[in-house]
Image (cartoon, rainbow, N blue to C red):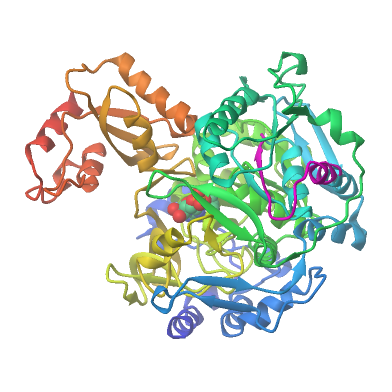
């Protein structure tokens, strides 16, 4: 296609390639920053040694593979898929898709007819190839000194025991299981056990409130919920069972009752006898699982059978159940993990994400285990008991690949470098970043201080919906630019379009779309295929629309600039403004609310809420607190507004639509950029809001 060949031609002609390859990285960020005409001109090269040993060692090698991946996707991906175990081979068509709403129903299928099991490929396959005694999971508890591990053999036994229990409990292929667990080894064990028997897991991040949990339960109607009584996060005890009890009471009221609540007794956080118990429904994990058989036959499934559901935020109040299937997701997460981190079997890999988010699905559990990797699972907070904890863990386990979010980098960067430099970090080889754009200064600190100017950073751009990385560096191949996610992964054809949906070529900025599917793409929104089609394929017909803005520089590098829809990104967590608004207006004294994102030094974006109170209610500090509490209890602590702005009125068009563009400018105090306010029903409200902001 046009774009493909353009992309190829463009990168092939880059002037930086021959002279640049193999140069040593420049070290001094401050001098560097000053000397640059623009960020685009800052190139950080992998060392010659790194490149020589890398899986993809040069831009030329990347181009060769990339070309094949887009010119012959069927051949490219089926070669890779053949490295996995398939009980039965897929049909003639490796991929069949309709990506264009104008041509009918959106439909994506990869390896259809192929029969496999992702748990088998993560565990049994690696054991059969001789890695049974290799460590699969290295667990580090919240308290330093509290740890554990499981080899591939041991992990398989644990997974089989739980799988057998679930089967006895009546869970069958295609049934949903909700998992509400903190970062114990039981969390990946639970995911794998579901996958083994063909059940569809839906992990709910254990920071979500009872109401959010019950909303998800009501949507997917699980047979069983897997949880634990409590967890310590930093110095704080979180009573998860309490939240689950409330969620189950609420979902029962809404007609979805769960028969079994299998509860892991997390003795380090809370004694079992102190846990509130619902006889008949609640069952202690430790009472039943050790008695279950340690082998469990695999339920073989079609490549297109569902693997999991993961709820994420969109621009309406209702979370979307993103559905991923088995075969394509398996091949895609494994391949992206391997190449983006230049994974080698001796690596020790740590991703700080929680399995409650997509990053934990694809790059704590599936991608790494499919590669037979040793994975660190950390229960606690990254700055507990102090800002050096991450590097203590890196040294303790000799972590070689460290993957985290810019928000953590920025928060650690504010502390003395000594918290980093007092640890060796010699084991580190590759660093990774995910969740939001990483600002160049955080990038440089991560590179220079954490990585000792030695370790390439893979800034991976992707989404819950994409299953795996779409734009990412391959660390040995390309010179990096701090703040750029660089180039598309194999098989991915990014397209930048203008408001009209016309593709723009060359150096430009616009909306980031993707032309045609990749194996890891989500297949639908659970129970709402129509929303899937309109939300992702309706805006720019013919393309998948990511919801992100993006620019492409003169060298063809991609720079992600953040969401262009009503979704905000707080510490790498995606939050729909509409969800926060509906939580706020559920407060009896709140009449109306409008939420926007504002720049936040550590979180990336902060939540800024304009609130109109019910007639006659005076604004007070207590009311502010109570509004914030409402959001915490309805969504979760991570969605609590940073700022409440009292708004006697909101700027609306004559048809009643709130003009967020104006609110964003007021929230970020860019008052000279308010733009045209003449179309407002009552332009006076703007001045009112500005005055109140200063007060
Ligand atoms: C949104 C997806 C899948 C990763 C965890 C978040 C933003 C993600 C990057 C990056 C710039 C990024 C985008 C995207 N995002 N990674 N490397 N550079 N922006 O998953 O909750 O589905 O959110 O996160 O805005 O659309 P998610």
Give 617 or 122, whichever is nearer the viewer: 617
Q: Is residue 176 magenta?
A: yes
Q: Residue at x 31, y 17 (%)?
A: 623
In the image, residue 466 lies at what x, y percent? 54, 61
Q: Residue at x 34, y 25 (%)?
A: 587
Classify residue 340 as left or right of residue 657: right
Is 591 situated above or below 372? above
Rendered image quadrant of residue 287: top right
Is 84 situated above or below 35? below
Is 13 situated above or below 122? below
Is 80 situated above or below 357? below
Q: Which residues are magenta?
A: 161-182
In the image, residue 390 lies at what x, y percent? 65, 36
The C terminus sits in image quarter: top left
Give 186 or 486, whichever is nearer the viewer: 186
Classify residue 43 as left or right of residue 453: left
Q: How many marks?
A: 0
Classify residue 372 as left or right of residue 317: right
In the image, residue 460 lies at what x, y percent? 55, 57
Q: Residue at x 93, y 59 (%)?
A: 130
Q: Is residue 239 magenta?
A: no
Classify residue 116 as left or right of residue 64: right
In the image, residue 340 lies at what x, y percent? 63, 62
| Residue 311 appears in the picture as rendered | yes
């Amino acid at each position: 296609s046009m774009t493909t060949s353009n992309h190829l031609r463009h990168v092939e002609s880059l002037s930086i390639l021959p002279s640049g390859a193999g140069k040593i990285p420049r070290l001094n960020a401050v001098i560097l920053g000053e000397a640059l005409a623009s960020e685009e001109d800052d190139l950080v090269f992998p060392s010659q040694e790194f490149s020589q040993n890398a899986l993809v060692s040069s831009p030329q090698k990347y181009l060769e593979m990339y070309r094949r991946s887009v010119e012959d996707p069927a051949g490219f991906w089926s070669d890779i898929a053949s490295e996995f175990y398939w009980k039965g081979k897929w049909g003639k068509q490796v991929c069949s898709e309709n990506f264009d709403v104008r041509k009918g129903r959106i439909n994506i299928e990869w390896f259809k007819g192929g029969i496999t099991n992702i748990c088998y490929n993560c565990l049994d396959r690696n054991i059969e190839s001789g890695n049974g005694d290799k460590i699969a999971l290295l667990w580090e508890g919240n308290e330093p000194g509290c740890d554990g591990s499981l080899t591939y053999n041991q992990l398989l036994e644990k997974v089989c025991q739980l799988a057998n229990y679930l089967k006895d409990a009546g869970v069958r292929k295609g049934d949903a299981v909700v998992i509400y667990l903190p970062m114990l080894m039981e969390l990946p064990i639970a995911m794998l056990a579901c996958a083994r028997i063909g059940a569809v897991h839906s992990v709910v991040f254990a920071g979500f409130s009872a109401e959010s949990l019950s909303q998800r339960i009501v949507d997917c109607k699980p047979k069983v919920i897997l949880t634990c009584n409590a967890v310590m996060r930093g110095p704080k005890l979180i009573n998860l069972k309490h939240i689950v009890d409330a969620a189950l009471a609420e979902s029962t009221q809404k007609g979805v009752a769960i028969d079994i609540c299998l509860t892991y007794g997390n003795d380090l956080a809370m004694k079992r006898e102190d846990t509130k118990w619902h006889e008949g429904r609640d069952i202690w994990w430790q009472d039943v699982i050790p008695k279950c058989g340690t082998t469990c036959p695999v339920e073989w499934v079609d490549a297109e059978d569902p693997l999991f559901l993961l709820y994420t935020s969109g621009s309406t109040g209702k979370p979307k159940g993103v559905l991923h299937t088995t075969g394509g997701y398996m091949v895609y997460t494994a391949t992206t993990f391997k190449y983006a981190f230049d994974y080698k079997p001796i690596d020790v890999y740590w991703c700080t994400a929680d399995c409650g988010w997509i990053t934990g699905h694809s790059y704590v559990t599936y991608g790494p285990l499919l590669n037979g990797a040793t994975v660190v699972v950390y229960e606690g907070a990254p700055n507990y008991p102090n800002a050096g904890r991450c590097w203590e863990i890196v040294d303790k386990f000799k972590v070689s690949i460290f993957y985290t979010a810019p928000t953590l980098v920025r928060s650690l960067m504010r502390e003395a470098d000594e918290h980093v430099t007092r640890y060796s970090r010699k084991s580190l080889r590759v660093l990774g970043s995910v969740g939001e754009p990483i600002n160049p200064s955080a990038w440089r600190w991560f590179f220079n201080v954490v990585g000792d100017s030695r370790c390439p950073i893979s800034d991976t751009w992707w989404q819950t919906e994409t299953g795996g990385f779409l734009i990412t560096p391959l660390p040995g191949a390309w010179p990096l630019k701090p703040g750029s996610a660089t180039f598309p992964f194999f098989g991915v054809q990014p397209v930048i379009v203008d408001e009209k949906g016309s593709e723009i070529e060359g150096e430009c900025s616009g909306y980031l779309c993707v032309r045609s599917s990749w194996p890891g793409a989500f297949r639908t929104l659970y129970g709402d295929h129509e929303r899937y089609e309109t939300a992702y394929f309706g805006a720019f017909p013919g393309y998948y629309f990511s919801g992100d803005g993006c620019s492409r520089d003169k060298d063809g590098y991609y720079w992600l600039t953040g969401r262009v829809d009503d979704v905000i990104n707080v510490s790498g967590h995606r939050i729909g403004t509409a969800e926060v608004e509906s939580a706020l207006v559920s407060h009896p004294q709140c009449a109306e609310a409008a939420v926007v994102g504002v720049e936040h030094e550590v979180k990336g974006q902060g939540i800024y809420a304009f609130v109109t109170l019910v007639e006659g209610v005076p604004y007070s500090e207590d009311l502010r607190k109570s509004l914030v509490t409402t959001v915490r209890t309805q969504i979760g602590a991570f969605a609590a507004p940073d700022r409440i702005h009292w708004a006697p009125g909101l700027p609306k068009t004559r048809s009643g639509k709130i003009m967020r563009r104006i609110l964003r400018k007021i929230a970020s105090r860019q008052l000279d950029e308010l733009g045209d306010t003449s179309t407002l029903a009552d332009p006076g409200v703007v001045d009112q809001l500005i005055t109140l902001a200063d007060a």
